Amino acid sequence: MADKKDKDKAAKDGKGKEKSDKPKPQQAKPQAPAKSKEPRGAKKGAEAEASEPTEARPRDPNYTPRLRTHYQKSVTAALSKRFGYKNPMMVPRLQKVVINMGLGAAVQNPKIIDSAVEDMRAISGQKPVVTRARKSIATFKLRENLPIGVMVTLRAERMWEFVDRLIAFSLPRVRDFKGVSPKGFDGKGNFTMGLREQIIFPEIDYDKIDVVKGLNISFVTTAKTDEEGRALLTELGIPFRH
């Protein structure tokens, strides 16, 4: 009897071991939703959109500046009718715009160059280059290679956008404005105009300027004569003085 009881007990213990030796299936733990990687202190919602600087986005390939569309649809037809161009390629077009800011005061105060670079960048939307003296002039205390101004050359979309803003917003802000003097043509259809103050541009913060700076704007065209060049700029919207 004792042997039988021992066998029964061993059999029960063996069954228990078999059950305990089997690995228990592990239940999959619910995964927490992936957290978006945000910098510390980043705000959420509308506050984040307002406080964080927007990154430069690539231009839409189908985008065409308003003034360029006006040139293609209206200006070319008007000039062809006036001058009798038989080929569309003969119609004068705006090739580039050069903005130059001469700074004679930079000889005494080199820091003016830094503020001029920022002003020009704001006005044109493009980083300017610093112009330097080609030779020394003792009378003006000018040394060779000394910074004397900043300059930027605009082409394509930025050129059209700048001219559009100049006509629509900046020129109307000129004090006692009575139109642009037509005396700036060079005999080859190119035109240069001068502005006494950079503060006429809405992009310039009046409270942050250190010195009032003048600048020159040159419109380089493919026109062969001043008459054609003036007609082109007039059709684009430059308000020449009569």
Image (cartoon, grey):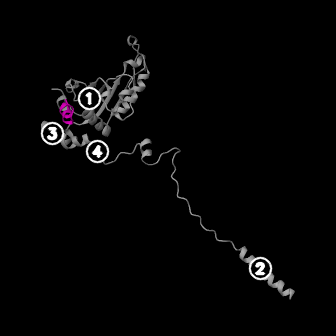
**Is 242 displayed left or right of 37 in the figure?**
left
**Residue 64 image label:** 4
Q: Nearer the viewer, mark 4 or mark 1?
A: 1
For the question of whether residue 159 can be seen, the reply is yes
Q: Is residue 38 magenta?
A: no
Amino acid type for the residue under numbered disc 3: Ala
Which picture quadrant has residue 166? top left
Whole-number angstrom distance, CA of label 4 to CA of label 1: 26 Å
Residue 202 x/y as whole percent: 32, 32
- Amino acid type at image mark 4: Thr
Residue that appears at 31% across and 39% down: 156
> In the rendered image, which residue does mark 3 sit on?
78
Q: Which one is earlier in the sequence, the residue at label 2 or at label 4?
A: 2
Q: Residue at x 71, y 76 (%)?
A: 19
- The answer for how far apart the CA atoms under marks 3 and 2 are is 105 Å
Dot 3: what SS? helix
* Residue marked by disc 2: 14
Q: Amino acid at mark 2?
A: Gly
Sequence-first disc among 4 and 3: 4
Tag 4: Cα neighbours inside 10 Å, few (<14), some, or many (≥20)?
A: few
Q: Nearer the viewer, mark 2 or mark 4?
A: 2
C-alpha separation, residue under disc 1 versus residue under disc 2: 99 Å
Amino acid type, mark 1:
Arg
Q: Is residue 193 above or below residue 164?
A: above
Q: Return the mark for residue 173.
A: 1
Front residue of 200/76: it is 200
